Amino acid sequence: MYSELYKYIIHIMQALLTKSLFTHQRRLFATTAGAQKRYFLVEYNYVEDTYYKRIPHREQHLKQVEQFKQQNQTKVLGAPFFPYDGCALLIETEGDQKAVESFVQTDPYMKAKLISGYAIKEFAGETIEMKRRFDRIASDFTFRS
């Protein structure tokens, strides 16, 4: 069950990342030497008392995030919800949705059954403005690279 705060946070994050896609007539597509960046929103729903139950799994979870970032030229930022019943991860990656799905499925929190459900949503296209927004809001979240 999603709380109103949860819905509000997701709405704000989506608005920040996609505003330029719908408010500008002209899209400025980024050109990079590497693969095209893709943006995903991963929403986790936690079981009761995950805040405490996650402690023995936290170090391994952080190691996996670091591996994911290195393998896919990825940036990850996350924000837990209050009360601690879920979180949202924003992911900028050269990987595809299968890479994100694999990350979620192998997450130590998932293996420990701390995640009761999740959703993965991809944002449309890469724009220069989207990248700026991603980097700007990254500084306001708990867990980032």
Image: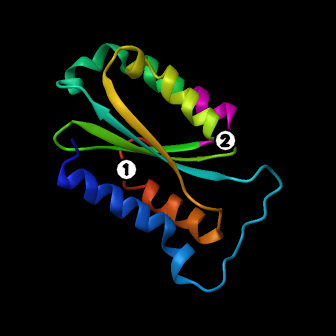
Q: What stretch is highlighted in magenta?
A: 66-74
Nearest to the eye among marks 2 and 1: give it: 2
Is residue 69 inside the magenta stretch?
yes
The structure residue drawn at horizontal position 41% and vertical position 41%, both measured from the top left corner, is 143
The x, y position of residue 87, in whole percent, is 32, 40
Q: Residue furthest right?
A: 33
The x, y position of residue 119, in whole percent, is 43, 40
Q: Is residue 83 rendered to the left or right of residue 17?
A: left
The x, y position of residue 135, in whole percent, is 52, 59
Secondary element type, mark 1: loop
Secondary element type, mark 2: loop
Measured Cα–Cα span from mark 2 to mark 1: 23 Å
Can residue 35 be seen in the rendering of this structure? yes
User: What's the residue type where badge 1 is placed?
Assistant: Phe
Is residue 140 inside the magenta stretch?
no
**Crowd around label 2: few <14 · some 14–19 · many ≥20 (10 Å):** some
Label 1 sits on residue: 141
User: What's the residue type where badge 2 is placed?
Assistant: Asp
Q: Quadrant of residue 127?
A: bottom right
What numbered label is drawn on residue 128? Answer: none
